[in-house]
Structures are given as C-alpha cells and as structure tokens.
Image: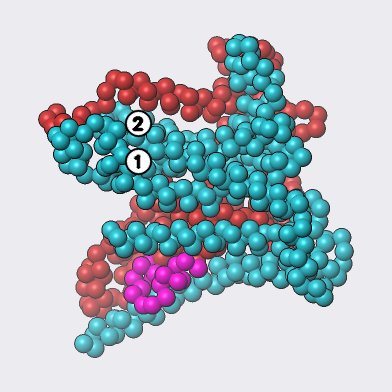
Chain colours: A red, B cyan
Amino acid sequence: MSGPIRRSASVRRLVAIGVTLIVLLSPFLWLLQMSFKSNDLILQFPPPLIFTPTLENYTSLWQGAFPASFVNSLMSASFSTALALILGVPAAYALSRWAGRGKHALSFAILITRMAPPIAFTIPFFLFYRWIGLLDTVTGLVLVYTSFNLPLVIWMMQPFFETVPQSLEEAALVDGASTRVVFLEIVLPMVTPGIAATAILCFLYAWNDFFFALILTRTNARTAPVAVVNFMNYEGWEWGKIAAGGSLVMAPVLIFSLAVRRYLVSGLTAGAVKG
Amino acid sequence: MSGKGLVDAERRRFNRWALAPSLIVLFMIAGLPAIYLVVTSLTPFQLVNPGSSTDFSSPLRNYRLLPDDPRFVNSLWVQAKLSFWGVLFQVLLGMLLALLLHTQSRVVEFARTFFLIPMVLPPIVVAIIWKLIYTPDISPLYYAAGLLNIALPSLTSSVDFALTAIIIADTWEWLPFTFLMVLAALQTIPDEFSEAALVDGANRLQIFFYITLPFITPILVISGMFRLIDSVKAFPLVFLLTGGGPGSVTEVTNYYAYLLAFDFNEIGYSSSVTIVMLLLVVAVSLGVVWMGRRREAMA
C-alpha cells in the first residue's frame, strides 16, 4: 500500500477488536450457553464452562404453552407488517413525488406518531379494547403494531423511491400509462430490495415488543416475550426455560438482522425517533 | 403544454388515493388515541369508579397535582439521570468503538456485524440477560468477583447501585447504535485531509482533535439526541431488573405512569403524567429534526 495512511488493520488493532467483541458479547453468549445446561448445571458453582449440552430446556418448552405464544408473536408481527406495507408503500411513493407545500409538515406529523412513548398509546388502546372486546386478541396487537410500523414504512421507503429516475416514469406517463400502472409495473419492481428491508425491520419492531403485549394480552394472545417473562414466577425462576425461551425469541431477530444490516441505520434512525 | 397538465392532474389524483388510506388509518390508530389521552387527562378517571371518566368538573386538577407529587418529580430526576449518563457513555464508547473499527479490512468489516447484536436483540431478552448477570447465585459476574475476593453487593437492590446497574445495561444495549452512526460519519471523511496533516508532521492525537472530531461532531450530537429521545424506552430493563426500586430510585416517569394506570387504576392522573412526558419528548424531537435540517442545509 502506498501513501502514509495504513489501509489494512494492524495485528494490535485486530487483537483489540477481538477482545472488545468478546467482552461485549459475553453477556449474550452466557444466556445462550445456559440454555443448553440442565438445571443442576446452571446452579452449580463455580459455573462449568465445558459441559455436555442438553436440549432438555427446549423440549420442555415445546410441551408447554410456549409454542402457542410463539405463533401469536409470528402472526401479530407478520400481519402488522403486511398491513403497514400495503398502506404505507403507496403513501411513501406519493410523498416522494409530491412537490407541493406541506410535505415536510405532513412527514413530520406522521413521524410524531412514532416518537410518542408507548405508554401514551397503551392507555387509550387498553380502554378502547376493553370496551369493544379486543383485549387479549391478536387483532388488537396487529392494530397497535401497525400504528408504529406505518410511519416507519412511510419514512424508510421515500429514499428508495427517490432513487428511481423520474424521466422513466414521465416517459411512460406521456405514452399514456396511468400513474397507477407506472407505480405498480415500473416503480415498484425497482424498489423491491427496499420493501424487503423495510418489511424485515417492521417485523422486528413488532416481534421485539414487550410493553404493548404485556398490557394488552393475558393468555389467548400472549406473545413469546411475555411468555418468557412468565417463567419468572413466585415458585422460583426456571432459568433453564428462561434461557431457552429467550434464545428462541432472539433467533429470528439475529437471522433477519444479518439479512438487512445494510439498511439497519436508516431503519433504526427512523425508529429512534420513537419513545 | 396540455399533456403535461393532464399528467400533473393525474398524478395529483393518484397521490390523493395513495396517501388517503395511510392518513385515515394513522389518524384512527394514533390521532384518536392521542386526543382521547388528552381528554382522559382532564378527568379523575379510575376504572373502579363509574362516571369518573366523564367528570370534567375540575379539568386541570391532575395537572395541578403534578408539581406537588414527590414520586412524579422524583421520576423526572431519575429519568434525567438515566438519560444523561446513558447518552454520555453511549456516545463516548460508541465513538471509541467506531474509531477502533474504522479500518479497511475484510475481517474487520465482517466483524462489525457482530458488534450490532445487543441493539437488535429484543429488549426483553436484553433485560433477561442482565437479570442473569445481576442475580448473585447464578451470575458469572459474582463468580468472577468471588475469585478476586471482592464482595459485590446485590447491585439491583442497592440504593446506591440500582440506577447504575440499569445505566450499564442500557449502555450495553444501545452502544451499537451510536457506534453505527459514528462509523458512517467516519467513512465520509476524505483521506486527503489526514494524509496532508501527516505529511505536515501532525501526530495521531492532533489529527483526531483537528480533523476527525470536527467532522464527526454533528453526528455525535444527533445520535446523542436520538438516544436521548429513546431513553424513555428503558421500560423492560426497569420492569425486570428493579421494578422501580429499591424505594423509587429507579422509577422513571414511563414506569410511574405504567404503575399509576395499570397497578393503581389512576387512569386519569396517569394520562396527565404521560402527556407531560410526551411534551418533553416532542420538544427534544423537534430539536433533532431542526438540527437535521440545518445540517442538510449546510451540506
């Protein structure tokens, strides 16, 4: 390499990075290794680092009510993602092509719904759901999650639409195609990667939710994050199940995050402006 | 240009149809609840007390009670402490991490992804992980301290350490966010600057303070503001690690509002607490958007 700036990592830097990574991830790895330990081993002191892994925590989860809560999580996250995309993608396109006044004000108004701390929505949702019987239903959760995924879709999709050359659309429009056809057949296929990334982020936000599920569900629609916490009960904490359940809850998150890591920044900054 | 005019009219019609469903839905699932929250905050609404939800005889009662409610005032202080230290650590450590990982190397680029793990984990799993670390009989931390003959107090039930314990966990969770933002900013700095400085005989510290730092200061501020807004979201940590205690040393406003509404059934009063909190968050958020705009204008 020429030039005064070294462009490859030095050994010292690599060692420092490795050590930092191990320190940073050790809490996470601790939970993971615990999920493969029997309860006797978990309580053993000093904690054995080398042991024969067992799947007994996972199999005992499978026999209980946990799988049902996992399905609830999957359903509420998927349906709210689908709903938010169906509504939000055309809206984002319209906003990205809208040159008129009020664009910034409207965008900001949309974003405000995302900045509010969750408790601001839980009280009205709780009262309203109690009234119309949506408490403890997946439908109820889907509606709540849509309320904070829709702004994310509208904000995240706009930059993707802005990368589509407008001359392409104008040519088609002048040739007599309707805006609807241009949107569906020219623009939409060009932003598919953006839609995929946005969908995954929406899914993760709904999947990761604990607060709404804690308050708006009891047993029927209980989601996996709440179910895991319920293993911490008065008779004592079932650490094996907690570790296994926690690991299962984070599994889809880790897989999806790897898939969309390029878009994480934009997704999380749009998401960051939410209480 | 009548063709162009027709196209424009068609586009406007399409835009209306594309935007309307979203705006209607957002109004119904976000606007109406917000309005309802304001209305509820003007009543002494308790679930056990029929008729209290429509009692507007003394609409500002809740808001007048707030300044004299020691738990509310305390919760704002707790939130301020949590936010201040959390944001400070996250920005500083995130910057250091970004500087460490800002290098062109395949291995390092691959490793970056793993540094993001704490941020993407479900918040409740993060809370479980730290519960594990703060629970003496199974914690690796307590075991390590035992090996070194250090007697660790029970961190989450100690008046002195409980909030620190939450700040540590919150910093672990969100450090990757500031790291990611700063790293993105570092990658926009043209190499020529530091190359020229090196040729002129500047040392690495000088390059950092005179070239790198001015470049990344805006992003440090903005990512700090993002984290500040978001710091009211520490609910799962408080819920699982300390439950607001001991006493109320970790009772943030969000958690107090939750207790008021869903433990004490004081829906009306909780709504007014929530609204005050909401106004504070919106004020900070407006600041962020304003700064973002100013930065865009400068660029």
| Residue bearing mark 2 | B100
Residue A203, given in percent of the width and then of the height, sits at: 51, 49
**A100 is within the stretch colored magenta:** yes
Q: Is residue A66 visible?
A: no
Report if residue A63 lies within the magenta region: no
State which region is magenta: A93-109
**Decide: marks 1, 2 in contact (CB < 8 A)?**
no
Question: Would you say residue B228 is visible in this rendering?
Answer: yes
| Percent coordinates x, y for residue A209 in the rendering | 60, 47
Q: Quadrant of the C terminus of chain B?
A: bottom left
Determine the main secondary structure of the stretch shown in magenta. helix
Left/right placement of residue B159 relative to residue A26 reads right
User: Considering depth in this image, is B279 or A155 the residue closer to the camera?
Assistant: B279
Q: Quadrant of the N terminus of chain B?
A: bottom left
- The part of the image, by quadrant, that contains residue B185 is top left
Q: SS at mark 2?
A: helix
- Distance of label 1 from label 2 (alpha carbons): 10 Å
Q: Tell which subunit mark 2 falls on.
A: B
The residue that disc 1 covers is: B183
